[in-house]
Image (cartoon, coloured by chain):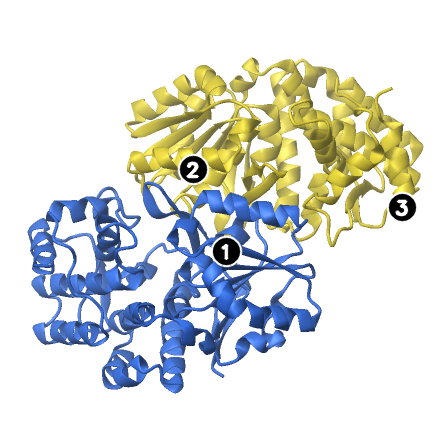
Chain colours: A yellow, B blue
Amino acid sequence: MPSLHVDLGPRSYPIHIGSGLLADAELFLPHCNSGPVAIFSDDRVAALHLPALRRTLTEAGKPFIEVIVPAGEESKSLQQVESVCGRLLEAGFGRDSTLFALGGGVIGDLGGFVAAIYQRGIPFLQIPTTLLAMVDSSVGGKTGVNHALGKNMIGAFYQPRAVVADLDTLDTLPEREFRSGLAEVIKYGLISDPGFFAWLEEHLDAVLAEDSDALSHVIATSCKDKAEVVARDEQEAGRRAILNFGHTFGHAIEAASGYGHYLHGEAVAIGMIMAADLSRRLDLLRESEQQRIYQIVEGAGLPTLCPRLPAEEYLRYMRVDKKAKGGQIRFILLRGIGAATITGDVPQAALIQTLNAFMEP
Amino acid sequence: MPSLHVDLGPRSYPIHIGSGLLADAELFLPHCNSGPVAIFSDDRVAALHLPALRRTLTEAGKPFIEVIVPAGEESKSLQQVESVCGRLLEAGFGRDSTLFALGGGVIGDLGGFVAAIYQRGIPFLQIPTTLLAMVDSSVGGKTGVNHALGKNMIGAFYQPRAVVADLDTLDTLPEREFRSGLAEVIKYGLISDPGFFAWLEEHLDAVLAEDSDALSHVIATSCKDKAEVVARDEQEAGRRAILNFGHTFGHAIEAASGYGHYLHGEAVAIGMIMAADLSRRLDLLRESEQQRIYQIVEGAGLPTLCPRLPAEEYLRYMRVDKKAKGGQIRFILLRGIGAATITGDVPQAALIQTLNAFMEP
């Protein structure tokens, strides 16, 4: 079983990756406070994977309650935060309690945020059950909820005590969601790990077949790559922004197309195609490299075109993005595969050309 | 003008205390991000003190918006957090913005919490306008809101970039609120500063007359005493709990009597009387010391008795307190004036005797 260590000084934590991990109490108990545990999940994931975790805690004699919210992005709201905190208060949970976030990105973001602000912070463990959550939201400490006026606009940086990624949970993941997770995997190769990108090009078939050795390698490498970036810039002051490669476009595509039309990774996939195109237009990236990027995204079964809308509509959503500084949109571009760069200096004309080049007919 | 420095490594910040400070742009601007400022206040404070701050920012050419909420504890809610964040989003505020919290404890707690979670954190400045906020909530980084099931149950540890305590704002503070603030001042003497306690006994008249030299000394010493405790234990793992002296009883009194019946400092005053009594019953404190404590609280015009209710009612609220560990209530007691101690080991009988000894007839 591969294990990683995310090095953040006093907030460091391990990531365990493998099969059958939900049954291994020793991966969970050493990271819990002395009091009870709240297993936080959504109704879809709970039906599939909560029984295994329930058995483990019961056998270990650790008291716990189950707090289940409806599956879906709509649960990422302050109303839901209030309701979940109410459940914990009703159960008499104090600062000696611990929260387990069992689920995908929504559960990790919402559960982590509840843990961050419940009584000003209780420990939490991430137990991701989607590829996207395993390679993305389980590393980096970003937690939060949506506001009616913008996605992820309310949140906190808050690190888990441990991440337990049980590969068995991926067996029940719909293929479309699996492929969406691959978008973030490809991203790590593109921004900082050219060797990993080449490995992905070579082993794409094994990955798509969900071969378990290939999956372990994909998840461990993605977490390692992300952890390296995060360890150097925990609060996202500078370099960490490269993790948002594809996201400036991606967030605008999600917002403009109406949340839910695309999965997050699908929007990021189109965003990466656009960021690569913009990089090529600005003479940072060779056309052959742009081609390789297009091919792997398409080969992973991810979309490459966004809905046809006036470019100005996408631009408007980009300007409200958290990465906009003083109204200027900041872009993560590529100076080659594996070499991301951050710039605010993008001519509007090139940007509009890129947007128009990847709209559906 | 006395200035202090709260030493928390990379999160260190200055506290400025004096008259006319709202007019001094140099106390504010160096701590702001490059973008616009949101002056956050309540309708009562804004009417009195916002014009001075508005003039200062206007003359300095710093762009700002004003976000005003209704005065009162009811504003400390997640609904209000959502609404304030909505105002910031509508105004296009990004991570380069800064929040000024101009007001008393509610504004500091709510404004600080909004700053902590808006886009995962923007800088904020505390501009306290009550004695309580100056000596208590402006030091320590505790921010948060209430939940229907408990006060301050949702929050974050988040430090301001600077605190500016303008004594002129106290001129408009109702006397009852001023005396309520004195309860926390007395507390600092009791838990860690016997010299300050003796000074207060000697200069109580000057303090009650709001003599400006006496006030400066009171605020600076209180902040210094609190900052020393906080610097050693920022996340409230251990020793910092002594700052809750009088609060285990106080919170229960506030809850059992219905929030709003007592001001916070008034409930803490009764709580300190009770904690002193309990300390004496457990042979930790001499009767003469208990007498001195009673006299200064009474001399400051603060209440010393709580509403008559079954003791069990108060106990129930104490058990849900954040300081309860594994269901056991933790108490901050005194081993003498200036020497607080933390214990979970209090016989229920003594506790009930103390509660019954300080109920209204």
Place of residue A128 in the rendered image (x, y in percent of width and height, measured from the top left): 53, 27
Q: Amino acid at mark 1?
A: Gly
Q: Nearer the viewer, residue B347 or A215?
A: B347
Q: CA distance from mark 3 to mark 2?
A: 44 Å
Disc 1 designates what residue? B111
Q: Chain of mark 3?
A: A
- Quadrant of the snapshot with the C terminus of chain A: top right
Label 2: which residue? A82
Q: Decide: few, some or many residues near mark 1? Use Cα within 10 Å; few <14, some 14-19, many ≥20.
A: many
Residue A123, position in %: x, y?
Answer: 42, 41
Under tag 2, what secondary structure?
helix
- Asked if the residue under mark 2 is in contact with the one under mark 3, i.e. CB atoms within 8 Å, the reply is no
Decide which of tag 3 and tag 2 comes sooner along the chain. Answer: 2
In front here: B159 or B61?
A: B61
Q: CA distance from mark 3 to mark 1?
A: 38 Å
Q: Is residue A324 toward the left or the right of residue B143 in the image? A: right
Q: Single out the mark in the foreground, 3 or 2.
A: 2
The kind of residue tagged 2 is Glu
Could you say which is closer to the camera, residue B199 or residue A212? B199
Where residue B9 appears, x then y in whole percent?
Answer: 52, 65
- Residue drawn at x 44%, y 15% is A47
State the CA–CA distance, disc 2 to disc 1: 18 Å
Residue A333 against residue A130 in the figure, above or below: below
Residue at 13% across, 71% down: B290
Say if residue A15 shows up in the picture: no
Residue hosting label 3: A347
- Proximity of marks 2 and 1: CB atoms separated by less than 8 Å: no
Near-viewer residue (B307 or A258): B307
Q: Amino acid at mark 3?
A: Pro
